[in-house]
Image: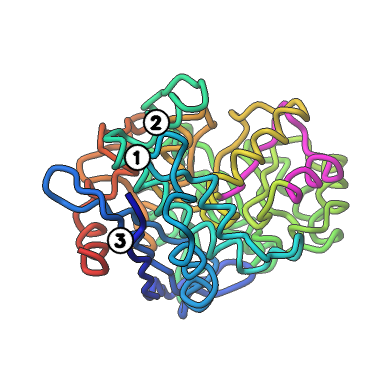
């Protein structure tokens, strides 16, 4: 049993949208295939992975630095003790050979993308859905029913309030009970009008979360907090720069409602610093670490351990990214839910074909691996790379 090839292609996921910091007109994504010599039901086992939106594809790092380390390793060094499957932790250690600590940068995205493909392959070799395998491996109780919220509400060129309302209405009509919109890309007064328009549209059928994408300095963050606390929001997300823990800590004085952050923190050390110094409140706040951007599930497990030691429940984690990898982690390890992009970043966002949102939850299908084979538009792209 061995990895025989690792392939990468960088694909566009461009869209004419913007948040408070960036536009997505040139956004790309790395798609990776980890090809093994294992055959299951007449087909060779290939694990697939890709990086989350908001960070660009990492083809150079994957092809030139990380993939060669696995292909050059002794095959037995990448297997588990029984020799009957790949070992994600041993593979992760091989990926990170000769890497200095700290300064995570873009390498965390490259490693996280490969790691996703490895776990897909491991579950396929085991013949199990990844969420079932994770629950068995780490002593959890698998729960196929996962909370999801609809992320959208970006700034579109020429988008009027009526179009924003129609977008949010469409999510509620599809079964979502929480919807999210962007703020910080317009003056506060304009954002307030946008928020009030959405709240009027969704009424009591759903809750609204708002996301500043790290745009605010302390003065602006406080001004928005004073405005936002008048509304029954699900959360106020990523208020200031991700590494400015002081801004985050200060906001608890001005915003009593739930806050959320973490999608741009890429290691368990960064997660620990957020908990130590960011003033996050385990009774109401939410953590959004995304394994696809932060060295993968192997590192995410270390992050969960950091949270456990600090007294946080995994139920306070709702990962960023809207991908099926985090859905499996949520179902297998008891997270609080997952982000969802019903219309954006296709074919990578969304659920397997036929999966519906019902009262804010989806039910995981019993698909082997991560479940990419159940999403017809996505697996057709994946198989062009490796099958």
Q: Is residue 182 left or right of residue 278?
A: left
Which type of secondary structure does the marked residue at label 1 adopt?
helix
Where residue 62 sits: x, y (%)? 49, 71
Where residue 190 sits: x, y (%)? 63, 64
Which type of secondary structure does the marked residue at label 2 adopt?
helix
Q: Is residue 96 left or right of residue 31?
A: right
Which type of secondary structure does the marked residue at label 3 adopt?
loop
Q: Which residue has dot 3 on it?
A: 347
Residue 106's quadrant in the figure? bottom right
Relative to residue 125, is residue 57 depicted above or below? Answer: below
Quadrant in the picture for the C terminus: bottom left
Identified at 20% across, 53% down, the residue is 44
Q: Are marks 3 and 1 in contact (CB under 8 Å)?
A: no
- How far apart marks 2 and 1 lie (CA) works out to 7 Å
Q: Are marks 2 and 1 in contact (CB under 8 Å)?
A: yes
Q: Which residue has dot 1 on it?
A: 123
- How far apart marks 3 and 1 lie (CA) works out to 22 Å
Q: Mark 3 or mark 1: name the one nearer the start of the chain.
A: 1
Q: Mark 2 or mark 1: name the one nearer the start of the chain.
A: 1
Residue 294's quadrant in the figure? bottom right
Q: 150 or 59, which lies in front?
A: 59
Crowding at dot 1, Cα within 10 Å, few <14 / some 14-19 / many 20+, comes out as many
Identify the mark at residue 133; answer none if there is no mark: 2
């Amino acid at each position: 049993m061995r990895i025989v090839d690792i392939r990468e292609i960088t694909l566009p996921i461009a869209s004419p949208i913007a948040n408070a910091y960036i536009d997505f007109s040139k956004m790309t994504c790395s798609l990776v295939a980890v090809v093994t010599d294992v055959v299951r039901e007449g087909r060779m086992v290939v694990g697939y992975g890709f990086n989350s939106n908001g960070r660009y594809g990492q083809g150079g790092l994957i092809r030139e630095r990380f993939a060669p380390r696995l292909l050059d390793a002794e095959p037995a060094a990448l297997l588990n003790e029984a020799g009957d499957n790949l070992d994600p932790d041993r593979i992760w250690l091989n990926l990170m050979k000769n890497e200095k600590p700290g300064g995570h940068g873009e390498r965390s995205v490259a490693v996280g993308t490969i790691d996703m493909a490895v776990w897909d392959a491991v579950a396929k070799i085991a013949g199990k859905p990844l969420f079932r395998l994770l629950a068995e491996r780490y002593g959890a109780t698998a729960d196929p029913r996962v909370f999801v919220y609809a992320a959208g509400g970006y700034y579109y060129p020429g988008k009027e309030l009526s179009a924003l309302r129609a977008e949010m209405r469409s999510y509620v009509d599809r079964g979502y009970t929480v919807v999210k919109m962007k703020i910080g890309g317009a003056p506060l007064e304009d954002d307030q009008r946008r928020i009030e328009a959405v709240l009027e549209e969704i009424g009591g059928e759903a809750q609204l979360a708002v996301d500043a994408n790290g745009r605010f300095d302390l003065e602006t963050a406080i001004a928005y907090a004073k405005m936002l606390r008048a509304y029954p929001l699900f959360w106020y997300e990523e208020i200031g720069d991700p590494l400015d823990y002081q801004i985050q800590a200060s906001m608890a004085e001005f915003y009593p409602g739930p806050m959320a952050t973490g999608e741009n923190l890429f290691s368990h050390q960064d997660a620990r610093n957020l908990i130590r110094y960011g003033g996050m409140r385990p009774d109401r706040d939410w953590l959004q670490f995304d394994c696809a951007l932060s060295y993968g599930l192997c590192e995410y497990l270390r992050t969960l351990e950091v949270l456990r030691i600090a007294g946080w429940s995994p139920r306070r984690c709702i990962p960023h990214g809207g991908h099926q990898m985090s859905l499996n982690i949520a179902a297998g390890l008891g997270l609080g839910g997952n982000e969802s992009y019903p219309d954006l970043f296709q074919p990578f966002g969304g659920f397997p074909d036929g999966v519906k949102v019902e009262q804010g939850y989806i039910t995981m299908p019993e698909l082997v691996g991560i479940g990419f084979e159940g999403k017809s538009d996505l697996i057709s792209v994946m198989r062009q790379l490796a099958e």
